[in-house]
Image: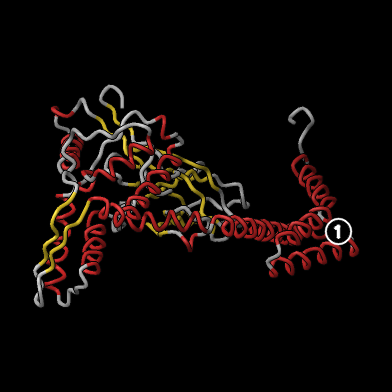
Amino acid sequence: MARGVFEVIATGGDSALGGDDIDAAFAAWALERGAAKATNPHERRAAAVASRAAKEALSSASQVDFVLALDVAPLALLVERAELEAVAKPFVDRTLAAVRRVLRDARVKASEIDGVVMVGGSTRMPLVQRAVGELFGRPPLVDLDPDEVVALGAAIQAEALSGNAAAADVLLLDVIPLSLGLETMGGLVERIIPRNSPIPTARAQAFTTFQDGQTAMSIHVVQGERDLVSDCRSLARFELRGIPPMVAGAARIRVTFTVDADGLLGVSAREEKSGVEASVSVKPSYGLSDEEVARMLRDSFGAAEADMAERSLREAQVDADRLLAATASALDADGDLLSAEERSGIDAAMADLRGVRARADRGAIDAALKILAAATENFAAERMNRGIRRALTGRRVEDV
């Protein structure tokens, strides 16, 4: 935060965790201690209300009466703050785990944080304030109303986004909660904008065609942290048509991702030589809850090793497909340069590569790629010589 600019460098949390969880657990504890049961929706609702009232009272008192009117007989208990804190501790520990993840994402230590603002009614609990103070090595800031501070901040940000002059001196730089990218060959994800990038932002990357004479490219925009498209969230699809037919790899398609201050994503693809362009706009956060964001992040952490292995295999398979296609095209065009023995050797190397590619063995694919590259080395040199001779035929040395 500096000169009216608030920059978010990391965000995270658990939307399935809150004061209601403590209320429900405390109510269940009280019913068990009093050997009572809430047998219908009315009683269960009354238990939740009584639990919340006792929880709130224990934020300032060391002990309170837990009173619950049940159909069979009323429940009255004297409960102490320590008993509530024992029930609430697992939920507070889950909160601190989310805080540690955000610190790790932000690449800062707890000791480097200058102040912690408490948000939400449950932050009035002494247990929560103590736990946060112990984690950060300093007491949290509690001079703001925890029930109003979020609404006030949202109102200020809405004023700024609306363009009103009154909020012109305040700027919030938010971040992207999940990475944005697109699908590449082999069903792999190429991340363009990594998660926790400040918005507004714009990133661009160059891509090319996979096949000779390719005149169109399908752009599939995805969101998530996994390496495979099938494990990420599909956002949008569009096609870039009108690419001039060229040999594979010659075309240059520049794909640009832009995210504005409202979080709206725009993706455009432009072929540099012809100027043909296509684009799409999408709201990445639409229909995505905080819990879904948290789940996607947890899945990416748990499957990181498997994802790396699968990505490595698929990249090798794509390399194999590319070399096989290029070799087949070269043989169709200039196969007459080869002797029968040379052609037989290349055909055998291609057959071996196809076989190991189907077996999904990364090490074997790499070895077969090297063998095919070595088998076609002289052929590539002969093709280059023929191309040079064709280019120079009928031309004077002075012109060259």
Viewer-closest of 303 and 38: 38
Amino acid type indicated by mark 1 = Leu
* Whether residue 215 is situated above or below residue 130 in the rendered picture: below
Left or right: 71 in relation to 172:
left
Which residue is pictured at 77% across the width and 68% down the height? 351
Q: Residue sitting at 34 percent across and 31 percent down?
A: 138
Q: Is residue 21 left or right of residue 374?
A: left
Percent coordinates x, y for residue 369 in the rendering = 76, 57
Q: Residues within 10 Å of mark 1 (few under 14, many from 20)?
A: some
Tell me the quarter of the image containing the N terminus. Answer: top left
**Image check: 139 left or right of 307?**
left
State the colouring used for the structure image: secondary structure
Residue 201 visible at all: no
The answer to whether residue 361 is seen in the rendering is yes
Residue nearest the viewer, comparing 125 with 287: 125
Camera-nearest residue between 69 and 7: 69
Local secondary structure at mark 1: loop
Residue 212 occupies quadrant: bottom right
Quarter of the view holding residue 317: bottom right
Q: In the rendering, at what x and y percent does residue 359 appear?
A: 70, 69
Q: Position of residue 235 (x, y in %)?
A: 37, 57
From the top left corner, tell me how far across and down residue 3 is, in percent: 27, 22
Whether residue 153 sits left or right of residue 391 in the image: it is left
Q: Which residue is mark 1?
A: 338
Task: State whether residue 246 is above or below residue 173.
Answer: below
